[in-house]
Image (cartoon, rainbow, N blue to C red):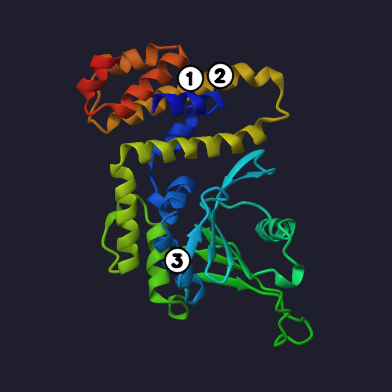
Amino acid sequence: MNDAYRDVRGAKVTTKMLRFVLQRPFSPLHTDAMFGAVMSDPENCRELLEMILGISIDRIEVSKEKSMVYHPEYKGVRLDVYARDEKNTCYNVEMQASRRPVLGKRSRYYQSQMDMELLAKGCEYAELPDSYVIFLCDFDPFGAGKYRYTFQITCREAENIFLKDGRCIVFLNTRGENSKDVPKELVSFLKFVHADLKESQKDFQDDYVRQVQKSVTHIRESREMEERFMLLELLLQDERREGRKEGREEGRKEGRKAGELEGAQEMLQMALNRFGELPENLLKTLHQQQDIEVIRNWMQIALKSQSLDDFISKM
């Protein structure tokens, strides 16, 4: 983990971001990185798309290269699930754990990106394949209580006339209320996504959810994969935060440094809390340390330690 962690730190990942990953108060799929890791399995991705869209897909290919792309809004990376099926239909799926503005414009941007890439490769516009942009939201994006909102262009004057341009945008809502109008399997999956960490480990009486739970367990049991996706999540969080920092007054730098140190100390303590109650002398040592680089080094040790004694021996 050391080299990768240094690389991410070089990208200015702040210690406060570790709180999001280490505390993990939400379902495993609430993080972009874990969602992307689980859906990089073609079978997981294929079954989810079939469930959402109500279509049959024989084969799916998930593009790992295109799933991590530059996004000007974040001034950095955006992690999606980008896939194609045997008919060359394109799918772009993104996890939305928190509410963001102008989701409609975001969906337009994503679909235009897919079209422009195909046209740049020499595809004629008449040959553009069907494309789907899917947002998995842990909030109700439109406030109508629907588990699924599907958008295709129709004629305002004659609603039974469809434009048939091959585009479809779907917003999923984990907090829906119309369970009778959507497949039972989709409701179970959305409830799993919305569940907190403890609830997400229960049996949802659904084969697909069990399959996803196994994938999450496999990733977590692989120390290399867990660290890789944790660090990717930190990088994503940092890229977004850097964009919001621009334009702030120079005089706030010292305050931010103090906040980062305090946040680092708190997160290190949270990382160690999984071993049980911490001795007073250890807590005192953690709080008295004013060098953030030392705290970060201790965090690396904590992440790899098997017990509290193991951590203390390596400090």
Mark 2 vs mark 3, foreground winner is 3
Instruction: Look at the picture and state if 168 lies above or below 236.
Output: below
Q: Say whether residue 52 is left or right of residue 286.
A: right
Q: Say whether residue 202 is left or right of residue 258.
A: left
Q: Say whether residue 254 is left or right of residue 265.
A: right
Q: Where is residue 185, by image quadrant? A: bottom left
**Circle 1: residue type:** Leu
Q: Say whether residue 31 is left or right of residue 206.
A: right
Question: Quick check: can you spot residue 145?
Answer: no
Tell me if label 2 and label 3 are in contact, CB under 8 Å.
Answer: no
Residue 128 image position (x, y, % from top left): 69, 68
Residue 83 image position (x, y, % from top left): 53, 60
Q: Quadrant of the C terminus?
A: top left
Q: Residues under labels 3 and 1: Cα distance?
A: 44 Å
Q: Residues under labels 2 and 1: Cα distance?
A: 6 Å
Mark 3 vs mark 1, foreground winner is 3
Could you say whether the residue bearing mark 3 is in a helix, strand or loop? helix
Tell me if label 3 and label 1 are in contact, CB under 8 Å.
Answer: no
Q: Residue at x 27, y 33 (%)?
A: 274
Q: Residue at x 53, y 35 (%)?
A: 235
Q: Where is residue 122, by image quadrant? A: bottom right
Q: Which residue corresponds to mark 2?
A: 257
Tell me if label 2 and label 1 are in contact, CB under 8 Å.
Answer: yes
Residue 61 image position (x, y, % from top left): 49, 60
**Circle 3: residue type:** Arg
Q: Nearer the viewer, residue 220 or 295?
A: 220
Q: Which residue corresponds to mark 3?
A: 46
Q: Residue at x 36, y 52 (%)?
A: 196
